[in-house]
Image (cartoon, grey):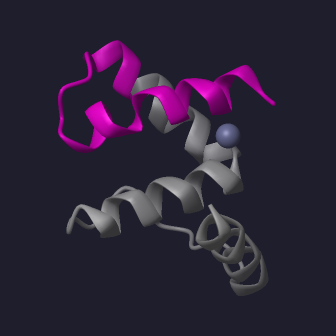
Amino acid sequence: MNPECLFVLDHYNDYISGELTPEKANRVEAHIKICPNCEVFLGKAFKIHGRTLGLLRVPAPETLRTSISSLFDKV
Ligand SMILES: [Zn+2]
């Protein structure tokens, strides 16, 4: 797994609650711009927390979204 993906997984909770340092928040944001998996994951995480992810302007393709959703539903 990409170490940046692991970084996002490790820090998304703090990112959502706004508790990350600006440096770490920037690292998360830079990564989700280039990683559709983490973008979708973070989008879902924000939904669970009842927040909208305003910074994500380009939605992932529906097929990818569905495959990721089914992945996460199994966990
Ligand atoms: Zn990633």
Q: Report the residue at 40% width, 38% height from top.
A: 12
Ligand 1: quadrant of the figure = top right
| Numbered label tally | 0
Magenta-tinted stretch: 1-25
**Would you say residue 56 is visible in this rendering?**
no
Task: Verify whether residue 31 appears in magenta.
Answer: no
Whole-percent x and y of residue 33? 59, 46
Image point (57%, 73%), residue name: 59
Left or right placement of residue 55 versus residue 52 in this view:
right
Is 31 in front, or is 67? 67
In the image, residue 11 sits, relative to residue 75, either above or below, namely above
Q: Position of residue 64 (x, y in %)?
A: 76, 74
- Could you tell me if residue 2 is visible in this image? yes
Please tell me in which quadrant of the rendered image residue 31 appears. Answer: top right
Going 48% across and 27% down the picture, which residue do you hit? Answer: 10
Residue at position x 31%, y 66% in the image: 48
Q: Main secondary structure of the magenta part?
A: helix
Task: Give residue 47's quadrant in the image.
Answer: bottom left
Q: Which quarter of the picture shows residue 30? A: top right
**Relative to the observer, which residue lies in front, 22 or 17?**
17
Task: Pinpoint residue 1: horizontal percent, then vertical percent.
Answer: 81, 30
Residue 29 position in % (x across, y down):
46, 37
